[in-house]
Image (cartoon, rainbow, N blue to C red):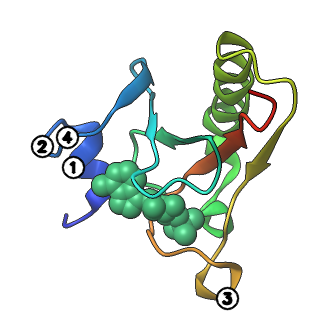
Amino acid sequence: MDCIFCKIAKKELNSEVVYEDDDIIAFNDINPSAPVHILVVPKEHIESIAHLNGNHQGIISKIIFTAKKIAEDKKLVGYKLVFNVGREGGQIIDHLHLHLLGGWNK
Ligand code: AMP
Ligand code: ZN
């Protein structure tokens, strides 16, 4: 499948990885909107929040807990977590991702 985040997850495309496990990869956004802008991405191709089903409860929870851990590791005092959903919601890449934005305190 021609999906840029699937390619990043499979290391077919380079990215600045900040966290990885069997289910998740997190990397720096290539065009940051904040001093710290990290994308937390499931390795499984899920199109968006609108495409979640009951089997995805575990992975969506893990994405949020991973963002929390990265924020703690990076000592972010406050931060924003954003899911853009669909074109009208500002989603450009159709592979679910959580934006972790912060670092204004540094
Ligand atoms: P969204 O608008 O929610 O779909 O966000 C997609 C994000 O992916 C944007 O913030 C882009 O800057 C970012 N992005 C696009 N291509 C790459 C890439 N190759 N590596 C890292 N971030 C990327
Ligand atoms: Zn994908």
Left/right of residue 74 with respect to residue 31 in the rendered view: right
Dot 3 alpha-carbon crowd within 10 angstroms: few under 14, some 14 to 19, many 20 or more: few
Residue type at the position of mark 4: Asn
Tell me which image quadrant ligand 1 sits in.
bottom left
Badge 1 or badge 2: first in the primary sequence: 1
Q: Nearer the viewer, mark 3 or mark 4?
A: 4
In the picture shown, does residue 40 fall above or below 34? above
In the picture shown, does residue 85 fall above or below 62? below
Dot 2 alpha-carbon crowd within 10 angstroms: few under 14, some 14 to 19, many 20 or more: few
Q: Which residue is mark 4?
A: 14
Residue type at the position of mark 1: Lys
Residue type at the position of mark 2: Glu
Location of the N terminus by quadrant is bottom left
Distance in Å between CA atoms under marks 2 and 4: 7 Å
For the point 53% across and 53% down, the residue is 32
In the picture shown, does residue 54 fall above or below 84? above
Location of the C terminus by quadrant is top right
Q: Which residue is mark 1?
A: 7
Residue type at the position of mark 3: Glu
Q: Where in the figure is residue 75, as x and y percent of width and height?
A: 74, 15
Q: Where in the figure is residue 54, as x and y percent of width and height?
A: 70, 48
Q: Which mark is residue 88?
A: 3
Helix or strand or loop: what does disc 4 sit on?
A: loop
Q: Which residue is mark 2?
A: 12
Badge 3 or badge 4: first in the primary sequence: 4
Distance in Å between CA atoms under marks 4 and 1: 9 Å
For the point 62% across and 41% down, the residue is 35
Badge 1 or badge 3: first in the primary sequence: 1
Helix or strand or loop: what does disc 2 sit on?
A: loop
